[in-house]
Image (spheres, rainbow, N blue to C red):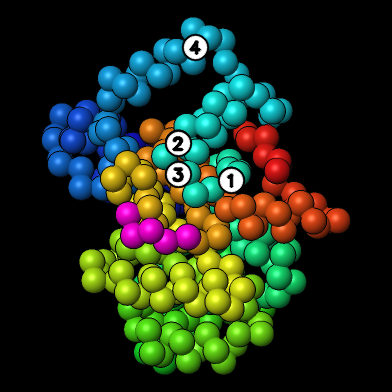
């Protein structure tokens, strides 16, 4: 079979799956256990009855792509408020990568600064501004070709779960920081003993008036049907969600707290969020 796909890493696509059911995915009739569930997007598994029922409801109610303010977005925001009560507004977009990108845009607009402090080991999707990893000296190394030198110069890493070194680096670049960005419980470097570190970042950001962004793509909704920050009583300024919140559809969510909402209202130049699939405004 001729294959015209060009996937990440230029893989030869030897394994083309054609269907999924429950915890299994299939190549023709050969069954495999899915340990990924679409990188965490399918919290109910493949082909779930709830998902199919939701699609039927959408068809029966004649819902459509509106690209304008709509009742469905309003209703969804109210549901999010019930499970994420610390946030004042929600901005919808198409993916987790897009949510991170726009969160950084918000931070730069508010602070008028450009330096992103990223915690080593965190993953923030296919986003040019964060598509770097830290080497042994915590210097940013590109994960892809095609990234700009400007973005590489404007990202600094602090070591995950190392309070002493992180504090030194944060203090060194304090005047240049636009945001501190972290995946609180990391998918690639999980550490269940990171509560003290998360509380340190939360306290540092509050004390020094720095914007703290939690990327909870993986932990959002899976943690007590809420979030890591709710579990540990933390208060980041901005949080990004996605994956399983879409139930199988692509989605990204930016949640902002009351402080960020007030700062955005004071800005003369508004921040642009709009795209075809979500009508976003604050």
Q: CA distance from mark 2 to mark 4?
A: 26 Å
Dominant SS type (magenta): loop
- Reading the image, the residue beneath label 4 is 59
Q: Pinpoint residue 201: horizontal percent, then vertical percent.
A: 45, 74
User: Mark on residue 88?
Assistant: 1
Residue located beneath label 3 in the image:
84
- Name the mark nearer the viewer: 2 or 4: 2
Tell me the distance, in whole angstroms, between the alpha carbons under discs 3 and 1.
Answer: 9 Å
Question: Counting other residues with Cα less than 10 Å from the Cα at mark 3, is it few (<14), some (14-19), or many (20 or more)?
Answer: some
- The residue under label 2 is 82
Nearer the camera: disc 1 or disc 4: 1
| Relative horizontal placement of residue 123, taking residue 18 as reference (left or right) | right
Highlighted range, magenta: 231-235
Which quarter of the rendering shows the C terminus? top right
**Of helix, strand and loop, which one carries label 2?**
helix
Q: Residue furthest top?
A: 60
| Residue 165 colored in magenta in the image | no
* Residue at image coords 63%, 35%: 278
Residue density around tag 1, few if under 14, some if 14–19, many if 20 or more, within 10 Å: some
Q: Residue furthest right?
A: 268
Which numbered disc flags the more N-terminal residue, 1 or 4? 4
Q: Earlier in the sequence, mark 2 or mark 1?
A: 2
Question: SS class of the residue under badge 3?
Answer: loop
Q: Mark 2 or mark 4: which comes first in sequence?
A: 4
From mark 1 to mark 4, how far is it between C-alphas? Answer: 31 Å
Q: Nearer the viewer, mark 4 or mark 3?
A: 3
Estimate the spatial distance between the alpha carbons at disc 3 and disc 2, rounded to whole Å: 6 Å
Quadrant in the rendering for residue 31: top left
Judging depth in this view, the residue of 273 and 36 nearest the camera is 273
């Amino acid at each position: 079979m001729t294959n015209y796909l060009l996937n990440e890493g230029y893989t030869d696509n030897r394994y083309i799956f054609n269907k999924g059911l429950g915890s299994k995915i299939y190549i023709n009739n050969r069954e495999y256990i899915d340990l990924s569930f679409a990188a965490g997007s399918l919290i109910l598994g493949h082909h779930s009855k709830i998902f199919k029922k939701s699609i039927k409801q959408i068809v029966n109610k004649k819902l459509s792509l509106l690209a304008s303010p709509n009742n469905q977005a309003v209703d969804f925001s109210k549901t999010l408020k019930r499970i994420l009560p610390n946030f004042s507004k929600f901005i919808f977009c198409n993916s987790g990568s897009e949510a991170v990108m726009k969160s950084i845009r918000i931070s730069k607009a508010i602070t008028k600064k450009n330096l992103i402090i990223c915690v080593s080991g965190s993953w923030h999707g296919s986003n040019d501004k964060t598509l770097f990893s830290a080497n042994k000296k915590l210097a940013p190394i590109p994960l892809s070709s095609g990234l700009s030198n400007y973005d590489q110069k404007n990202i600094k890493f602090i070591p995950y779960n190392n309070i002493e070194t992180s504090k030194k680096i944060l203090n060194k670049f304090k005047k240049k920081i636009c945001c501190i960005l972290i995946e609180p419980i990391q998918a690639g470097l999980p550490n269940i003993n990171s509560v003290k570190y998360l509380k340190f970042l939360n306290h540092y950001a509050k004390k020094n008036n720095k914007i703290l962004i939690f990327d909870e793509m993986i932990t959002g909704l899976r943690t007590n049907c809420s979030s890591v920050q709710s579990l540990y009583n933390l208060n980041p300024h901005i949080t990004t969600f996605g994956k399983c919140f879409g139930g199988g559809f692509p989605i990204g969510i930016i949640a902002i707290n009351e402080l960020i909402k007030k700062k955005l209202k004071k800005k003369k130049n508004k921040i642009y969020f709009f795209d075809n699939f979500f009508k976003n405004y604050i």
